[in-house]
Every structure is written in structure tokens, then in C-alpha cells.
Image (cartoon, grey):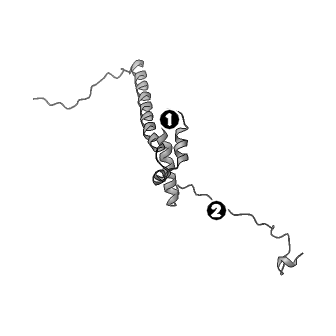
Amino acid sequence: MSAITSFAKSYPSNAAPSKVSVIAAVVTASIKRLARAYRNRAEAAALARFDDRMLADMGLSRSDVRDAFAGPVWEDPTSLLRARALERRLSRRHVSLGLEEAPLKAPPLVPEGIYPPVSRPARFTV
């Protein structure tokens, strides 16, 4: 008895995919991407019917939904909505992504070292 040890087809090493199959793969992938964007756009359109309280529960605002649909038709609006909701969730929990800003230090109103120190209140200096 013989046992089957491999199910993979073996091709000669010099066989390359034809141009037609490469073009077909690219067209198929772009059609799938467009169909996924259309499906996600239809699902995100349901968010436009929600009231502001329901959007706030998800970490979104009405302007986020408007911004998501302002892009071209072939772009996926859910990626922007997901990013905005994540942004708000992280800022609410004071989580930083390592992009901390340096603390702001305002310059003094009066340059130091130019004027002599005054021992009396400012109302008597005039």
C-alpha cells in the first residue's frame, strides 16, 4: 500500500504565472476591496440615523459621521470612525501613545536681570 504524503501540485521551476492570471488577480482583489467598502459604507450609514446620545455611547459625534462620509465613495468610512472612537477612549483614560508633548513654559512677563528688585508693592511704584 502506498500513502499520499503531499497534496500540493508541483510545477516546474521555470513556470511563471501568465499575465492574464496576474491581471485577473489584481482586478478580483480591487473588486473585493470595493465591495467591502460599499458594504461598510452601508453599515456606517445606519450610524447617521442614530441620535447624538447613542453616538456618544460609542465614542463618536455627529461630526465624526459627517467626516467619514465626506471621503470618496471607494474609501471605507469605518476606518475613520474606528480611529476617532479609539482616540476618544484613550484620551478619556489618559493613555498616551508615546507622543507626549513637553510641558509648556511661558516666558516671564518682565525680563529677568534688567530691572532692579523693588521692595514695595506695585501700586506705589508710579
Residue beneath the point at 41% across and 30% down:
32
Q: Is residue 2 above or below residue 106?
A: above
Which disc number belongs to residue 108?
A: none
Regarding residue 115, the answer to whether it shows in the image is: yes
Q: Quadrant of residue 21?
A: top left
Residue 5: image location, x then y, percent: 20, 32
Instruction: Using the image as rendered, state which of residue 6 and residue 30 is in the foreground.
Output: 30
Q: Quadrant of residue 3?
A: top left
Q: Amino acid at mark 2?
A: Pro
Residue 100: image location, x then y, percent: 58, 57
Residue beneath the point at 47% across and 42% down:
78
Which disc number belongs to residue 75?
A: 1
Q: Is residue 10 left or right of residue 119?
A: left
Residue beneath the point at 43% across and 32% down:
33
Location of the C terminus by quadrant is bottom right
Q: Regarding mark 1 in the picture, which secondary structure is present there?
A: loop
The residue singled out by tag 2 in the image is: 103
Q: Is residue 94 above or below residue 72?
A: below
Residue 54: image location, x then y, percent: 46, 52
Instruction: Using the image as rendered, state which of residue 75 and residue 46 is in the foreground.
Output: 46
